[in-house]
Image: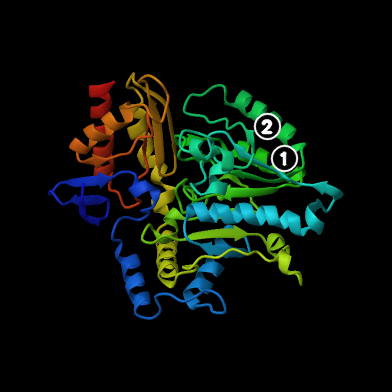
Amino acid sequence: MQVRRAQGCELQLADGRSLIDAISSWWVTLHGHGEPAIAAAIACQAQELEQVIFANFSHAPAEELATRLSQLTGLERLFFSDNGSTAVEVALKMAWQWWRNQDGGADGGNPGVERRQLIAFSGAYHGDTFGAMAVGDRSLFTAAYEPLLFNVSRGAWPHTWWGDGDVEAKEAQALADLEQALATPTAAVILEPLIQGASGLRMVRPAFLRAVAARVSAAGALLIADEVMTGFGRTGALFACQKAGIQPDLMALSKGLTGGFLPMGVTMASERIYQGFISDRPTDTFFHGHSFTANPLGCAAALASLDLLEQTPERFQQFEGRHRPLLEHLSQHPGVHHPRCMGTVAAFEVDAGEASYLNPIGLQIQRHCMEQGVYLRPLGNVVYLLPPLSISDQQLERCYGAITSAITALV
């Protein structure tokens, strides 16, 4: 299908049909398609400075964006890249090299002990470049590259849903397993705070993440938060780490960073991490770069998007209250299981055979909903809504109506 135009929450197809974009075009379109304030900021910036090498030079949009993101995240330093996967790659490389820069990789508190372990969580997805694939959950999508992926230890992800009465026991076991893994000298632990995206919008409680962060800190390891999907209001707070009450050492940002207008990645880092690369030794330098690092157009879009978020915080802070009654009604259907909701994200599982990304029920639901004028992209038997902030109540109700119709017809 060819998309001719997009405005707000709607995609206008070349054949004249209109679809509500209920998944923000793969979670990037934050405010809505064609948001005038962001479009105007890009147009203005394009007439002044569209691109310049970000070595030897700097520019005002990048400096302002760096300052604002630092203030908002509590992380003093940042590194620009191109997308979410590369933002994660940068974080992994920084964490690994930071330890190598500490007297050849030795733990400062335990001289001679090298930290060579990385820990990620079951079900994780962090991108499709090699480092990001390695820390992501191994699957059909990574199988071809298995010989090239480095080893990673795995922690359990005790995801929960409405009415889950076993969550505390699952969390206790997951934390015990994590403590055991951390007994091995660990360089870093990486996680998607509060919501794992691609594995099926699997949510954990803030208390669990606080317990994870406490154990990572006690073990002396670094904590990496992949906020590529969860950042910029998606969980009901500006950043999921803030909602959970944790402060990572490194944070990866992308997707909604520019409001979905342009690709851009950012890796935030603490001052402590930054200082670990400042020395007279060339080998301590962080040798990583991208041609479009700190692209002025992307920076201008990001600044305009931040303006909108700060001017209207209620749009993401109150979004969960819009989802809940509609999801509660839908969850009464006998084919709907494990409903969950956080911020702008609502999800559930369909009782239709194997719980798998390849379950054909997803494509069937997608086709049915498109006939109703709603674009979804279920993850197998997991159906979710992650719409732009600008979606109206009427449009949101249409989305739930289309889903209800699909579940009734197919399950």
x and y percentages locating residue 400 in the rendered image: 28, 35
- Crowding at mark 1 (Cα within 10 Å: few <14, some 14-19, many 20+): some
Asked whether residue 312 is in view, the answer is yes
x and y percentages locating residue 153 in the rendered image: 66, 36
Q: Residue at x 57, y 53 (%)?
A: 89
Residue hosting label 2: 175
x and y percentages locating residue 347 in the rendered image: 40, 34
Q: Tell me which amino acid carries mark 1.
A: Arg
Q: Is residue 283 above or below residue 351?
A: below
Determine the residue located farthest toward the bottom in the rendered image.
48
Residue hosting label 1: 215
Q: Residue at x 59, y 59 (%)?
A: 268
Q: Give left or right: position of 379 versus 165.
A: left
Q: Earlier in the sequence, mark 1 or mark 2?
A: 2
Say what secondary structure mark 2 lies in: helix
Q: Residue at x 65, y 57 (%)?
A: 94
Say what secondary structure mark 1 lies in: helix
Give the quadrant of the C terminus.
Answer: top left
Determine the residue located farthest toward the right in the rendered image.
111
Q: Is residue 178 above or below residue 93?
A: above
Q: How many marks?
A: 2
